[in-house]
C-alpha cells in the first residue's frame, strides 16, 4: 500500500514586495479536522473516489501559525482547534512528530515540510528557529520569480520525500503583478506491507455495486485473517461494520467502514461520522477470525484548499489587505495566494497482478464471519496508539 500527499501554500508579498487529557483532546480535534476536510472535499465531487490527508494540511497550517498574528492567527487556531503557541500543545505535537513510525519492519513513514525562500527575502530568526525544529521541517533557497524553475526545484524535493510517488509538480501563475516570496510545501509519505499479506493467487474478479447501482467486475483481494472488527450503529440508526487491518509492526492500520445493509448508501452514513463516534468504534473493536474481501484500488486527487479553508472562517490569510503574517519576517505584506493539495493512495497485495483463485469456494465452505467490501466504503489510514489520521477517503468505484 502506498499513499502519499502533497500540500502547497504560496505566499506573495503585497504590491510586489494534564498530558493524558491533552492527548485525548488533540486526538479528537485532529480526527474532527480529518472528517471536516473529507466532507469539504467530497461535497462537490458527487460520489467519486476521494482521498485527502489531514496530516500534511495541518502541518502546513501549524507552520503558518508560527508566523501568523492578530486575527489571522485567531482564524488559524479556530480552524485547527488548537494553537502551537500553547506550550503544552507544542511540546506534545513535537513529541508525536518525532516518534512517528519510521523505516523498519517493512514500514516507512515520513512527514516533512520545506519552506522555499526567494533569495533576498528577510526572515525572522525566531520563525526560522521554530520551523526548523518542527516535524522534519527545513528551509531551502529558491528562485521563485521564475515559475518554471521553481516548479522543477519543488518537484525534485517532493520526489525525494515521496520515494518515487509521482503526484506531479506544483505550478502557479503570478497574479496582480506580485512575485512569490515564499513557497511552503508539506508532504506525508507512507509505504508498508500488510502484517498478513493478501496473496495474488486468491484475487479474482467479483461484483462491486457502485453508488448508482452499476455493477462492475473488480479485482477483489481475499484472505482469512485475525483482525479487529466490530458492528455498530450510527446516530441515525444505520448499521455498519468496522474492520481494522494492521501493517507490519502494528504502528499503522487501515480502518474500513462499510454499511451492513446493501441498500444503505455510504452517503447516508458519512454525515453522521464524528470524532467521538470514531473513537468509540475503534475503542470497541474485538479480535475476530474473518474472511476478508477487499478490492484493489488506487486514488489520486487534486484539491483547492482555499475554498475549504474559507468556509471554515480562514479568510484573512488570503486577503492582501487583512493577512497578518508579520511573524515570518517582521514585515507586513505577506499573504497566502494559493492552497493546493494533492493526494494519492494505492491498496494492493504488494503490487501483484490479479489471477484466478478460489475465494468464493473458501467462503462457501467457511462458517466464520466475513467482511466483504463489494460496495462503497469509507477508510482511514491511522496510527492506533495516538489515533492520528494520516489519510482519509472513500471508494465508490475501484476501477476509476
Image (cartoon, grey):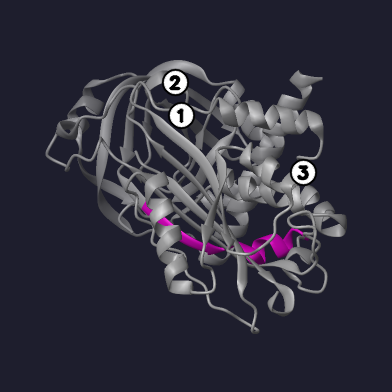
Query: Where residue 253 is drawn, which disc sits there?
Result: 1
Nearer-the-camera pick, 40 or 162: 162
Residue beneath disc 3: 81
The region drawn magenta spans 299-313
Residue most toward the right? 70
Query: Where residue 250 is drawn, which disc sits there?
Result: 2
Label 1 – label 3 distance at C-alpha: 25 Å
Rendered image quadrant of residue 117:
bottom right
Nearer-the-camera pick, 362 or 280: 280
Label 2 – label 1 distance at C-alpha: 7 Å
Rendered image quadrant of residue 205:
top left
Label 2 Cα crowd, 10 Å radius (few <14 / some 14-19 / many 20+) = some
Quadrant (top left, top right, bottom left, bottom right) of the N terminus: top left
As drawn, 160 above or below 275: below
Residue depth check, mark 1 versus mark 3: number of the one nearer the observer: 3
Quadrant (top left, top right, bottom left, bottom right) of the C terminus: bottom left
Amino acid at each position: 500500500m502506498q499513499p502519499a500527499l502533497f500540500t502547497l501554500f504560496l505566499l506573495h508579498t503585497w504590491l510586489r514586495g494534564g498530558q493524558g487529557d491533552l492527548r485525548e483532546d488533540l486526538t479528537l480535534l485532529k480526527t474532527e479536522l480529518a472528517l471536516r476536510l473529507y466532507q469539504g472535499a467530497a461535497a462537490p465531487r458527487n460520489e467519486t473516489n476521494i482521498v485527502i490527508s489531514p496530516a500534511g494540511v495541518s502541518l502546513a497550517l501549524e507552520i503558518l501559525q508560527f508566523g501568523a498574528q492578530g486575527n489571522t492567527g485567531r482564524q488559524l487556531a479556530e480552524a485547527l482547534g488548537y494553537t502551537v503557541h500553547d506550550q503544552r500543545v507544542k511540546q506534545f505535537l513535537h513529541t508525536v512528530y518525532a516518534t512517528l513510525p519510521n523505516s523498519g519492519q517493512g514500514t516507512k513513514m515520513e512527514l516533512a515540510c520545506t519552506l522555499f525562500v526567494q533569495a533576498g527575502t528577510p526572515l525572522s530568526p525566531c520563525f526560522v528557529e521554530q520551523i526548523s525544529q518542527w516535524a522534519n521541517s527545513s528551509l531551502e533557497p529558491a528562485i521563485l520569480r521564475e515559475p518554471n524553475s521553481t516548479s522543477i526545484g519543488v518537484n525534485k524535493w517532493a520526489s525525494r520525500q515521496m520515494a518515487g510517488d509521482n503526484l506531479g509538480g506544483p505550478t502557479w501563475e503570478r497574479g496582480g503583478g506580485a512575485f512569490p516570496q515564499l513557497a511552503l510545501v508539506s508532504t506525508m509519505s507512507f509505504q508498508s506491507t500488510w502484517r498478513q499479506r493478501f496473496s495474488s493467487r486468491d484475487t479474482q474478479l467479483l461484483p462491486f455495486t457502485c453508488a448508482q447501482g452499476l455493477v462492475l467486475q473488480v479485482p477483489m483481494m481475499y484472505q482469512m485473517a485475525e483482525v479487529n472488527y466490530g458492528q455498530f450503529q450510527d446516530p441515525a440508526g444505520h448499521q455498519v461494520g468496522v474492520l481494522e487491518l494492521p501493517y507490519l509492526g502494528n504502528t499503522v492500520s487501515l480502518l474500513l467502514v462499510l454499511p451492513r445493509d446493501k441498500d444503505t448508501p455510504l452517503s447516508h452514513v458519512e454525515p453522521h461520522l464524528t470524532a467521538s463516534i470514531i473513537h468509540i468504534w475503534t475503542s470497541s473493536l474485538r479480535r475476530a477470525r474473518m474472511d476478508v474481501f477487499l478490492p484493489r484500488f488506487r486514488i489520486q486527487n487534486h484539491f483547492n484548499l482555499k475554498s475549504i479553508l474559507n468556509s471554515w472562517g480562514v479568510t484573512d490569510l488570503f486577503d492582501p489587505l487583512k493577512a497578518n503574517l508579520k511573524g515570518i519576517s517582521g514585515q507586513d505584506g505577506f499573504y497566502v495566494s494559493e492552497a493546493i493539495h494533492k493526494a494519492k493512495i494505492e491498496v494492493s497485495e504488494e503490487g501483484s497482478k490479479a489471477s484466478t483463485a478460489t475465494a468464493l469456494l473458501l467462503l462457501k465452505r467457511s462458517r466464520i464471519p466475513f467482511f466483504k467490501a463489494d460496495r462503497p466504503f469509507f477508510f482511514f489510514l491511522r496510527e492506533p496508539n495516538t489515533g492520528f489520521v494520516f489519510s482519509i477517503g472513500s471508494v465508490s468505484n475501484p476501477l476509476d
